[in-house]
Image (spheres, rainbow, N blue to C red):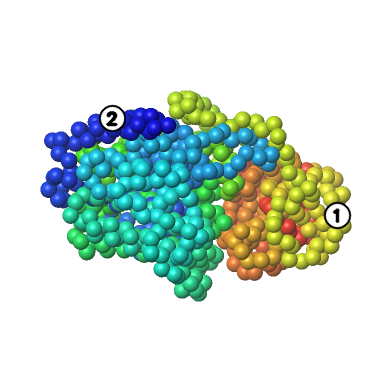
């Protein structure tokens, strides 16, 4: 064992020795005059969505300090995390390598394989290997003092910041959430925790202290906030403030989440103020980024599709800002796609530290300095062969220019989107652009082979869950459901079971559950549905799934159905979706009582290929993809919930 450690140390020294030698004039930065080397502050938020901050268009959250950072530097519109979950992106930042190259492809420890998953997930390494050369190790060898403050989440003890090139580690350990919550004292390894202190504030104070202590020599601060990861906890006064704040656009936003974002923003402000106070602003390179997309139970990340845990843009596109007054023009924006693998080479480029080992990322210093508009890179890649707790499925993806191709391993499905015209990934272009699809798929496959990617395999133990056997939703219905199954009224029950309710039916659903009847006669021109629905889930916690949809189509599988209805849990919105929820869809925010009764009138016009839903004063219309030729089945759908529906009133021809 000792020999292994020695070998690791040796391998590491070789890499670093070469890097250190490559510094101009063989000078160690510590010996260079102060101010020669830029200081580097990397601020990483956790689970913050692309559109969660003011300068990315959020109408409700307040982020004056992050906006101030953007106003003083360059804001990237197409910056990506290398993964839609925590640990892999963090590893990519530290090393400049893709998670698939490292073999660290999921959050640590990840979900276990289970009979509920169609595919068996491959194993992955649950630590950042010590052999890997981190930003901190390279900068330390170049004479920087290095400090990590906050979340680490890259392996067990022995693989913490102090083992990966950081002189100082404040609070970084194996966990992905702040153990024990945001109010101190918690179970983190922080010293002198004062009762009632808020973790985000404490980490900001620690970061500011580190800057002050090292103001006379080049420093690298990795300021890694737990915010805004679960548990969703904010300071009481902030929760009250946002509870009382009027929504400027009628949307419903989560007051506690908004409060967490305010504290995160104040932390950024404290760091920036410290740099100003010590007159370090001009010579300090400040990065701001999040490790993956926003969690959809608390934020919608509109207009992007899906959120954390998903390979769609909502899961991987991030707010990203770089400020360096010495070289970056204030108030600039950049639309060139960049990835979290690019930070290491960019930092080394600007710090004048030459890279002597192979990585995946590219320096985007030329974009920052305004010397170039593009990097001339062929593609950016993702490989996440795992299920996520948020409902994401094993997938890989490639982005080339405006186009993104996604490979979903369940059912071996390929999707292609033009992000320039279709940022919400609504229109799959696979059939329209076969040549581009084939080319991009070939590139993705070649990359997967090159990085020796591991793939999911069919799960021989897979058991499709049905609603009858298992009640997926934990919460009890608010209204007593009269027992006496109504299952016999339906021709198709997938992951669903039906009881009686005061409205008519009470439909219990697992993942994407549907209860459908076959129509006596298919409708080929027009179908009009009238239905009432009401959630039967009680309680106010955010984890409650509360939703209900009218479902109809010319088939009974998820992809063949149109769903029209409401989300009434964390996010409250109307939706019409064609195919799987989150696929082609239109949504509008809703207000009002989520436990109330809703009357929907839905009209499917098969000639025009449109579906219109009217609910109260709201009207939504979705233009279909042109594939719905007739309506043969209709019924109800839900996701891990219980919803009361009236019997369907269907007219049409
Ligand atoms: Ca995260």
Q: Is residue 373 above or below residue 192?
A: above
Which residue bears the numbered disc 2? 14
- Image location (x, y in percent) of residue 216: 18, 54
**Seen in the image, is 163 located left or right of residue 489?**
left
The quarter of the displayed image where residue 523 is located: top right
- Above-or-below relation of 461 to 163: above
Indicate the position of residue 631 as horizontal and vertical percent values: 75, 44
For label 1, the residue is 485
Mark toward the start of the polypeptide (1 vs 2): 2
User: What residue do we see at 66% from left, 66% from top?
Assistant: 539
Q: Is residue 383 visible?
A: yes
- Measuring 59% from the left and 61% from the top, which residue is drawn there? 542
Q: Residue at x 81, y 47 (%)?
A: 517
Secondary structure under tag 1 reads loop
Asked if ligand 1 lies within 8 A of label 1, the reply is: no
Say whether residue 290 is left or right of residue 413: left
């Amino acid at each position: 064992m000792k020999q292994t450690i020695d070998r690791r140390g040796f391998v590491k020294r070789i890499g670093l020795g070469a890097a250190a030698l490559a510094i101009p004039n063989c000078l160690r930065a510590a010996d260079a005059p102060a101010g020669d080397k830029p200081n580097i502050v990397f601020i990483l938020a956790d689970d913050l969505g692309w559109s969660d901050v003011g300068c990315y268009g959020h109408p409700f959250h307040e982020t004056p300090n992050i906006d101030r950072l953007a106003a003083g530097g360059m804001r990237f519109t197409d910056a990506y995390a290398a993964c839609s979950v925590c640990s892999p992106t963090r590893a990519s930042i530290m090393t400049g390598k893709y998670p698939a190259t490292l073999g660290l492809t999921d959050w640590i420890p990840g979900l276990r394989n289970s009979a509920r998953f169609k595919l068996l997930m491959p194993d992955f390494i649950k630590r950042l290997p010590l052999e890997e050369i981190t930003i901190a190790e390279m900068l330390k060898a170049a004479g920087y003092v290095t400090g990590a403050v906050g979340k680490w989440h890259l392996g067990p003890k022995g693989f913490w910041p102090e083992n990966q090139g950081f002189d100082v580690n404040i609070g970084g350990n194996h966990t992905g959430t702040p153990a024990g919550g945001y109010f101190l004292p918690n179970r983190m390894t922080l010293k002198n925790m004062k009762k009632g202190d808020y973790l985000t504030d404490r980490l900001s104070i620690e970061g500011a202290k580190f800057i002050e202590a090292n103001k006379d020599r080049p420093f690298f601060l990795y300021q890694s906030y737990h915010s805004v990861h679960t548990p969703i906890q904010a300071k009481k006064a902030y929760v009250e403030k946002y509870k009382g704040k009027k929504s400027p656009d009628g949307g419903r936003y989560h007051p506690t989440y908004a409060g967490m974002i305010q504290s995160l923003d104040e932390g950024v402000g404290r760091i920036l103020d410290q740099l100003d106070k010590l007159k370090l602003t001009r010579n300090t390179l400040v990065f701001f980024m999040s490790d993956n997309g926003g969690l959809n139970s608390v934020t919608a990340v509109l207009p992007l599709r899906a959120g954390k845990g998903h390979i769609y843009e909502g899961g991987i596109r991030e707010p990203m800002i770089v400020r360096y007054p010495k070289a970056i023009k204030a108030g600039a924006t950049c639309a060139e796609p960049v990835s979290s693998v690019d930070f290491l080479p960019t930092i080394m480029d600007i710090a004048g530290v030459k890279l002597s080992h192979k990585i995946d990322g590219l320096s985007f210093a030329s974009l920052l300095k305004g010397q170039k508009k593009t990097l001339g890179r062929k593609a950016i890649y993702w490989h996440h062969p795992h299920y996520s707790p948020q409902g994401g499925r094993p997938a890989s993806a490639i982005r080339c220019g405006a186009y993104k191709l996604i490979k979903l391993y369940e059912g071996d499905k390929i999707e292609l989107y033009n992000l320039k015209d279709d940022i919400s990934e609504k229109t799959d272009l696979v059939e329209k652009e076969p040549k581009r699809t084939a080319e991009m798929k070939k590139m993705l496959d070649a990359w997967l082979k090159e990085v020796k990617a591991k793939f999911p395999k069919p799960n021989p133990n897979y058991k499709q869950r049905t609603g009858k056997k298992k009640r997926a939703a934990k919460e009890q219905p608010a209204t007593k459901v009269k027992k006496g199954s109504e299952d016999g009224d339906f021709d198709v029950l997938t992951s669903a079971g039906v009881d009686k309710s005061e409205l008519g039916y009470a439909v219990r659903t697992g993942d994407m559950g549907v209860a459908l009847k076959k129509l006596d006669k298919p409708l080929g021109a027009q179908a009009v549905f009238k239905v009432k629905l009401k959630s039967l889930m009680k309680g106010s916690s955010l984890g409650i799934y509360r939703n209900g949809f009218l479902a109809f189509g010319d088939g009974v599988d998820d992809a063949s159905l149109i769903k029209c209805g409401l989300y009434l849990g964390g996010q409250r919105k109307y939706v019409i979706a064609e195919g799987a929820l989150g696929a082609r869809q239109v949504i509008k925010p809703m207000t009002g009582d989520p436990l109330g009764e809703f009357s929907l009138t839905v009209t499917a016009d098969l000639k025009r290929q449109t579906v219109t839903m009217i609910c109260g004063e709201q009207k939504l219309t979705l233009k279909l993809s042109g594939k719905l030729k007739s309506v043969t089945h209709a019924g109800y759908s839900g996701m891990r919930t219980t919803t009361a529906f009236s019997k369907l009133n269907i007219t049409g021809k």
